[in-house]
Image (cartoon, grey):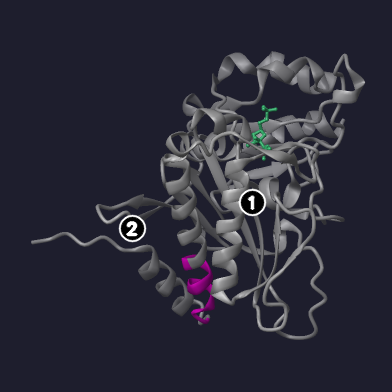
Amino acid sequence: MIRFEQTLTNFLLDHQEKYNRTYNFLILMDALISAAKHIEHYYLTGALKGNLGLAGNVNVQGEDVLRMDQIAQEITVHYLRASGRVIHAISEESEKIIPINTEGGRYFVYFDPLDGSSNVPHGLPVGFLFGIAKRNLEGSEDGHLRAGKDYIAAGMFVIPTGTFTLALKDAGTWRFHTDETMDFVKPVRMILSEDTKEWELSFNPAHRHTYAKNVQNWIEQNERKYVFRYLGSLAGDFHRILSNGGMFMYPAIVNDPNPKKNRPHGKLRLMYEAAVVAFMCREAGGIAVDETGTPTLDLQPKEPHQRTALYVGSKPLVDDIARVLLR
Ligand code: FBP
């Protein structure tokens, strides 16, 4: 007897029918899956084809653009356009909002097509992160930037491991397995572990002396209680936190000896990095806050590439550091 696993499409169909929704979301998810698989192919063959180097230009954040950033961007916009379901998109790789099907589209998509740029030249784990919001179906739509709490879904692919995790509003965070046909199957619900022995701490230790004193002190007092892990790609590090519990943090940088390097508003981008993992964390029973202890999902973006500090993970641990942040 052949054993058949529930496929992603079956899973989404059940979800849509359970909540009496249309199939538009499946078509959008199919586009995102195709984009991620296509990007993964280029990443896996990147060293051979010489695509892991610099592209020669600088992006809106003032960072050197990688050839793979351009490839991932081009692939993602192609599939979002082909889906016909997207009003506009916001991407780390595009300064301006990308108008797609502004009249007939149904969703807004906020994405980082290749997150974890310091890992790219080495072919090490990077992420494809996305958040989805839906247009106002009851009245007029002004296309305003959505806060994370208004997202209907968020997800991430860890590339090149091919792991895919998807969170749906009020319906949990689900990690999929890859079957022999490279299809995503057998969704497993992710609930953050309450077993503190498994918890991990994840942050860039090279920066710890540039964080606010109260954050440095919190790390001093707590770091020996937990295992420390840092991959240098948000998707990879958050993937571990979802599995083992604990906390990933990218605090504000406020005490760098070279003031030019300070990042009082954090490094990570709110709409397509921090809010994405915060949404997935909430649906897995955790929370996320910024440098003021404000819930990340409540932060209303003022501009597409707004940055934020991020503390995300198991509620007791994030609550504990939030008490320090609020002081
Ligand atoms: P990019 O989108 O430019 O890759 O920046 C995001 C990121 O790479 C995250 O994935 C990661 O958590 C963080 O920056 C690593 O930053 P650092 O190298 O300062 O530790």
Q: Which residue is mark 1?
A: 276
Percent x, y of residue 72: 57, 51
Inter-mark Cα distance, 2 to 1: 23 Å
Please name whichever residue, 94 or 208, is drawn nearer the observer in this view of the structure: 94
User: Amino acid type of disc 1?
Assistant: Val
Residue drawn 67% across the image and 46% down it? 273
Residue drawn 79% across the image and 63% down it? 145
Q: Is residue 196 left or right of residue 95?
A: left
Under circle 1, the secondary element is helix
First in sequence, mark 2 or 1: give its number.
Answer: 2
The quarter of the rendered structure image containing the C terminus is top right
Outermost left residue: 1
Label 2, residues with CA under 10 Å away: few <14, some 14-19, many ≥20: some
User: Amino acid type of disc 2?
Assistant: Asp
Q: Is mark 1 within 8 Å of ligand 1?
A: no
* Range of magenta residues: 22-30
Q: Which residue is mark 2?
A: 183
Percent x, y of residue 112: 64, 49
Please name whichever residue, 31 or 18, is drawn nearer the observer in this view of the structure: 31
